[in-house]
């Protein structure tokens, strides 16, 4: 199963405060463990929401909203994409994670949908299209 690991933003991450050398070193060591174990598929830190935009959809209307966004507890400061056997395994990995912000922090883990999760409405044609797109992405990586 794939799991998206979401590191929640804090006032400091939203202010653009960068991690210190110790945290970068500790996180690098942790990422190295994840890669060696075959768990980590991707992972990145994100710039603060002041550099971001949101697009609100309402029917056929699209509204662009410039950051910053006020609800810090709802924002993401970084992410990983992991391949694990179970959510319990993902939880065990996250318990070993260095504190990602150096202060009070929250990390959310969410299972990623797989093709079989969509049932019969995900037709053979749609599955083939999905596989073709994934292959194209893999070639560019």
Image (cartoon, rainbow, N blue to C red):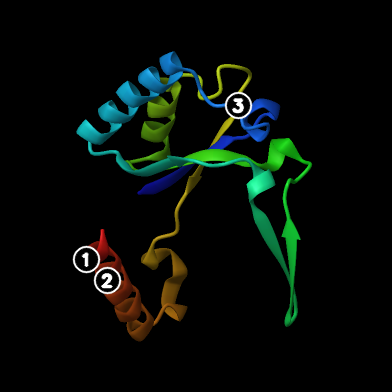
Q: Which residue is mark 3?
A: 17
Relative depth, front residue between 31 and 49:
49
Say whether residue 128 is left or right of residue 49: left
Give the residue pinned by disc 2.
Answer: 136
Q: Which of the 4 image quadrants contains residue 10? A: top right
Going 44% across and 59% down the picture, which residue do you hit?
Answer: 113
In the picture, measured across the screen, residue 53 lies left or right of residue 102, that is right
Q: CA distance from mark 1 to mark 2?
A: 5 Å
Name the disc covering residue 79, or none.
none
Give the left or right position of residue 115, taking residue 68 as reference. left
**Residue positioned 69% across, 42% down in the render:** 74
2 vs 3, front mark: 3
Q: Choose the circle earlier in sequence order: 2 or 3.
A: 3
- Who is closer to the viewer here, 43 or 90? 43
Residue 38's x, y, as percent? 23, 39
Q: Is residue 123 above or below residue 15?
A: below
**Labels 1 & 2 near each other (Cβ < 8 A):** yes
Residue matched to label 1 = 139
Please tell me which residue is depicted at 26% across the width and 58% down the height of the picture. 141
| SS at circle 3 | loop
**Relative vertical location of residue 7 with respect to residue 100 in this rendering, above or below:** below
Q: Earlier in the sequence, mark 1 or mark 3?
A: 3
């Amino acid at each position: 199963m794939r799991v998206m690991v979401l590191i929640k933003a804090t006032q400091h991450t939203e202010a653009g405060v960068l991690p210190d050398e110790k945290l970068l070193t500790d996180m690098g060591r942790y990422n190295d463990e994840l890669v060696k174990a075959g768990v980590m598929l991707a992972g990145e830190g994100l710039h603060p929401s002041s550099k971001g935009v949101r697009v609100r959809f309402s029917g056929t209307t699209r509204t662009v909203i410039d950051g910053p966004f006020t609800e810090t507890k709802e924002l993401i400061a970084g992410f990983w994409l992991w391949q694990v056997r179970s959510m319990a395994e993902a939880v065990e990995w996250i318990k070993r994670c260095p504190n990602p912000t150096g202060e009070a922090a929250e990390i959310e883990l969410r299972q990623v949908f797989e093709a079989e999760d969509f049932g019969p409405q995900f037709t053979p044609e749609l599955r083939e299209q999905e596989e073709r797109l994934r292959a194209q992405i893999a070639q560019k990586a």
